[in-house]
Amino acid sequence: MSEAIRVGVYYDFASSVCYVAHRVMQRLADDLESLSLELVWTPLDLCRLTGWPRGAPIEGYRRENALRVARELEVDVRMPGHWIDSRAANGTALALAGTVHEPAWRERVFSAIHEEGRSIDAPAALEALARDLSLDLRALAPAADPDALAAATDRARAAEVTGVPTFMLAEWPIGGIQEPDVMRSLLGRWAAKQRGKSEE
């Protein structure tokens, strides 16, 4: 099998559309493997990126658009009523990057917020999720420094990321999430093009 081509995915746990993207890409796991594509999920702080205020109500067009995306892609979601402070959860994901625990953390936090309707604003809430996975947040605290998340967000901005989810096809940011067939076709064509370049 050829070496995997890496596709970066920027996300924020607070975003219901990112949760939808997480579920859609899970459905494509076998296709990604057959294409030798590896998704590299990188959290960022969407509030820092866009200026959207923490704690702001999620209502009107924002809410309806997110729910429409979820319906169209057949993903059940329980949207929070306000934009949660996801920095600690995102920072923990960043600290776990490259480890076997990162996918489990991503799954646990996304499901807690967008399926179970749980808040993660309080430290005790995150500690409870970590215990579910036998993780010690205190041991991860140095690597989960808020400055690291801020730096990751600033790197995303420099790469012209303007929202989440964003898929990075090399230096090209592709925002949003589409139905599985569209994502499969898009990523498959891009992977073929990248492999063609490497063989020139």
Image (cartoon, rainbow, N blue to C red):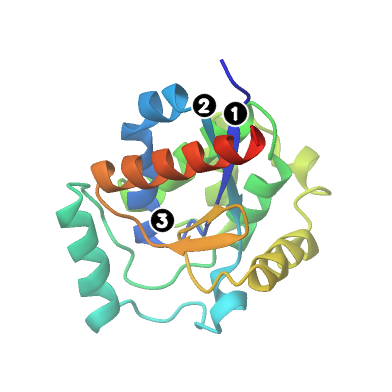
Q: Crowdedness of circle 2 by 10 Å Cα count: few (<14), some, many (20+)?
A: some
Amino acid type at mark 1: Ala
Q: Residue drawn at (24%, 49%), measured in percent from left and top? A: 179
Q: Residue drawn at (59%, 21%), measured in percent from left and top? A: 2
Q: Contact (CB < 8 A) between labels 2 and 1?
A: yes
Of 102 and 142, the residue lying toward us: 102
Please provide percent x and percent y for residue 116. Answer: 32, 46
Q: Would you identify the image quadrant in which residue 7 lies?
A: top right
Q: In this view, does 173 lie to the left or right of 179?
A: right
Query: Where does label 3 land, which residue?
Result: 18
Please provide percent x and percent y for residue 57. Answer: 35, 80
Please provide percent x and percent y for residue 199. Answer: 64, 32
Amino acid type at mark 2: Ser
Q: Quadrant of the C terminus?
A: top right
Q: Is residue 164 left or right of residue 116?
A: right
Of 137 and 152, the residue lying toward us: 152
Q: Crowdedness of circle 3 by 10 Å Cα count: few (<14), some, many (20+)?
A: many
The total number of labels drawn is 3
Which structural element holds mark 2? loop
Query: Where does label 2 land, which residue?
Result: 36
Please provide percent x and percent y for residue 21. Answer: 37, 50
Of 143 and 41, the residue lying toward us: 41
Which structural element holds mark 1? loop
Which structural element holds mark 3? helix
Between the C-alphas of marks 3 and 1, the distance is: 23 Å
Query: Where does label 1 land, which residue?
Result: 4
Amino acid type at mark 3: Cys
